[in-house]
Image (tube, rainbow, N blue to C red):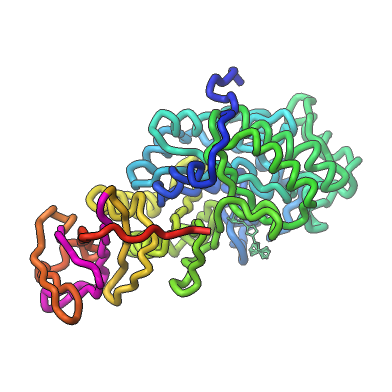
Amino acid sequence: LTVNVFAQPQQKKLSHDEKMAWWREAKFGMFIHWGPYCLYGGVYNGFNQRRGGAEWIMNRCKIPVREYRAKASTFNPTKFDAEKMVLTAKNTGMKYIIFTTKHHDGFAMFKSKASNFNIVDYTPFKRDIVDELAKACRKHGLKLGFYYSQTQDWCNPGGGTIRKEMREGWANPDSVAIDQFTKANLGGWDCLQRSASIEDYFKNVALPQIKELLTNYGDVAVMWWDTPHRISKEVAQEITDELAKYPQVITNDRLKRPDFPGDYKTPEGRIPKAKDIERVDWETCMNIGTSWGYKSWENKWKDAETVIRNLNTIAARGGNYLLNVGPDPTGTIPAPALNCLKQVGDWMKVNSEAIYGTQRSEVFPKWGECIRKDEKKNSVYYLSVFKWPKDGKLIFETPYKVKKATLLADQSTLKFSKTDKGVVINVPSQAPDKIATIIKLELGVKLPPVQLI
Ligand code: H79
């Protein structure tokens, strides 16, 4: 790896609000689950994997370590194009990417000195995917964050959550089976640290890899930990101390619960109910299909209507939306997902000002969502209409004075009047956008700030 001039840690301490500023502005990101599990595509020995995401196949189908590693050694995603992937996210209106640098299978998608079970040293592909993504993100102005499974590594005895069948032929840490495999396949070189305990694993693999991620790829936007169990307070503290050298790094809440809450909460696959919303930063991560990792037999893709309305609902409740895709073994995002993202991008081209830099409105109209944005002097409500009124009159109950109403679809000004029911806006008879039409209401006041805790 070449020396990276961007890699110098920032010394300036940032306040929590300063650190969170870009993230709160961004609202919409792409989650990418990609690793050697995609080679199975949710199928093992001719059977479809039953439960869990396809990235869990090694565990769910009890695949022995040796077999899984042999499979991983064939990973050769020749169609992978970091710039294309980053531009897909950018054209969808996404402002950041969270990439699985190492999932529970223990395979690193980056060059690592701590374990040769990585994309550069262990596969014919030999390219550092994290490095290519980091460069492409920097070039196209997206932030890049790293998902890193800090508590699990199914290919390492110290790594945790290993079912006994997975250890077949590899029963104890001193077994030579792995070395024989690596010798045969990798010309004798094996720097895999076979850790005897979880403590060893942290010392030998996890901490060194976390340091590699923090120093080798320029500024890291987010560290996205997963599965906050089996980790001692001491180790979590050690990671936290390391992170303190990089004050710009935002972390999620999955390092260790409940002692290390991080900077934001991560509801998984669901949007918190309006009445349950706490005054904290949060991000819903969700699949575009039904699996995080690539599933060759996926048959339930979300449509653009679902994704766009979710994005609007999440924005109205003050959250971020992290939408996941799982590239296939060639390095390509499946076509149904790309098709959906394209439609979301088309919607964003017209309406993104109703999403970026917005916050919770705490107003819940029956026909859709109300998203708030504070401008210098006045506040704005973006009304996101899912159910278009049949009589051409949209009723919005608000105590505030409305100065102007604009239809974002064509930038036309809409007439409105104040009645005892609320503001009544005259709208076209047909919905300009059947999924979500945005009406921008400029208020005569600046609303009091929403205080997060
Ligand atoms: O990366 C994705 C998941 O693989 C990961 N988090 C998201 C972002 C994740 N790791 N653990 N879990 C989620 C929770 C695990 C739940 C389990 Fe199961 C229930 C493990 C075994 C039973 C789900 C169902 C996974 C396998 C079957």
Residue at screen point 29% across, 70% down: 368
> Splitting the image into 4 quarters, where does residue 222 fall?
top right
Q: Taking the image as drawn, is residue 99 in sight?
A: no
Q: Where's residue 161, x and y in %?
A: 76, 56
**Is residue 228 magenta-colored?**
no
Residue at screen point 80% across, 42% down: 201
Q: Where's residue 404, x and y in %?
A: 14, 59
In the displayed structure image, the side of residue 382 where residue 115 appears, left or right: right
Image: 115 above or below 370: above
Q: Which residues are magenta?
A: 377-406
Residue at screen point 79% across, 52% down: 232
Q: Where's residue 159, x and y in %?
A: 78, 48
Residue at screen point 84% across, 45% down: 199
In the displayed structure image, the side of residue 335 where residue 7 appears, left or right: right
Image: 143 above or below 162: above
Front-lying residue, 80 or 49? 80
| Residue sitting at the far bottom | 420
Q: Taking the image as drawn, is residue 376 in sight?
A: yes
Q: Where's residue 322, x and y in %?
A: 47, 53
